[in-house]
Image: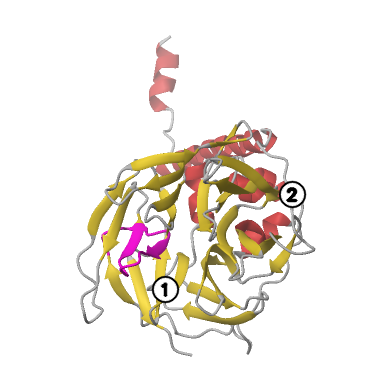
Amino acid sequence: MPAKANESVNRPKLSLRARICRWGLSLLAVLVLGILVFLLLPSPIKPAKWSAPTAPSFKEAGPWQQNNKLSAAQLVTDAPKSPEFITFDKGDQLYTGDSDGKIYKVAFDAEGKPQKAQLFADTKGTPNGLIFDANGNLIVTDVKKGLLSINPTGSVEVLADHVDGTPIYLANELDIAKDGSIYFSDTSDYGSVTFKEIAENKPHGRLLKYDPITKQTTVLLEGLYFANGVALSADEDFVLVAESYHYQITRYWLKGPKKGTSDIFADNLAGFPDNITRDEQGHFWVGLFTTRISFVDQMHSNTWLASTMAKLPQSLLSGASAPAKHGLAAELSPQGELIGSWHDPEGKLYGITTALSHNGYLYIGTAPGGSKGVYRVLITK
């Protein structure tokens, strides 16, 4: 017994370097085991393979060529942090919503300078699209509440939150026809914006129509890849809906021999199209929330990579789909031809959702993840 005790006392201790090496090997083993378990876990999605078209180049001459047209944009108001959409009433007051449910109005003085924003209403949801109807009510598509009507005093009424027995999952953008019909997008039956839907690459969106006379909502189009911005043509012979995740805009015919059918109005856009507005010339302005993300395009062509990425928590994936700090908007002809693009490559203005031409200015709205507040820039061509 004494000899053994003496051996224990005289046993050489491990050096600091050896102990660090042992700890490192243990941590490596745990890490490798964790990776193996992660890879063996089933994916929550079964992605569809898609070869995305090569993104247009900003360096080559043409309508997508990079410029600084948006770099001189000036702040109109910073009251809404994320002004998804912008509209004006008959008195030229600006209205915009924020992601916390509040809707603001901004008046302009005799010289056209914006005044301090005033709170108009609170939907208690997330208002996106806003357009006034012929009766002076502000019609709103709210992500959480559905299709709403807000009277001049700010009182909120729900027009529609279901269609054909199913919920309106994510009411996004809208336009109103001369007869009062409201065309709006139901972005995705996921019910929220999630990276998993991008990875899955399957269509979950719809284009809807609300009839103010019958108070009925109908489905016009299904199977849309993240249905987003909506705009009617000047003659109301068709309505457009942006499919953000496939970089395209789809046209649904309301009149003529193609009535009730759809086709592609514009494709292979240089980013993710968001809202669409129409100017007095009948041209369409498109806000592009972010330029193309090369990793996303690579993921679409590799279903294993897409399946694996979908296993990660949404909180870790937010950076993968964050907007590039490059402001971008596009102008399209009534036939869908790209007339030109407006850029802010410096990234002062980015995450653009809306580009609205009004009284000689291009008004810019953004969403969470982008720059804050409403901006405008003089339209020069």
Residue of label 1: 347
- Does residue 347 appear left or right of residue 200 in this picture? left
Residue sitting at the far right: 257
| Vertical position of residue 270 compared to residue 320: above or below | below
Q: Secondary structure at mark 1?
A: loop
Residue at image point 30% right, 52% down: 152
Q: From the image, give the main secondary structure of the stretch colored magenta.
A: loop
What span is in magenta? 78-96
**Res 187 visible:** no
In this rendered view, identify the residue nearer to me: 14 or 347: 347
x and y, in percent, of residue 72 in the image: 36, 83
| Vertical position of residue 27 compared to residue 10: above or below | below
- Does residue 251 appear left or right of residue 195 in this picture? right
In this rendered view, identify the residue nearer to me: 355 or 193: 355
x and y, in percent, of residue 229 in the image: 55, 59
In this rendered view, identify the residue nearer to me: 226 or 67: 226
- Foreground: disc 2 or disc 1: 1
- Does residue 190 appear left or right of residue 342 in this picture? right
Residue of label 2: 303
In this rendered view, identify the residue nearer to me: 131 or 361: 131
The N terminus lies in quadrant:
top left
Query: Residue 92 colored magenta?
Result: yes
Residue at image point 63% right, 76% down: 334
Q: For marks 2 and 1, give the CA distance.
A: 32 Å
Query: Residue 353 colored magenta?
Result: no
How crowded pointer 2 is (Cα within 10 Å; few <14, some 14-19, many 20+) is rated as many
| Vertical position of residue 251 compared to residue 169: above or below | below
Q: Quadrant of residue 85?
A: bottom left
- Does residue 314 appear left or right of residue 44 in this picture? left
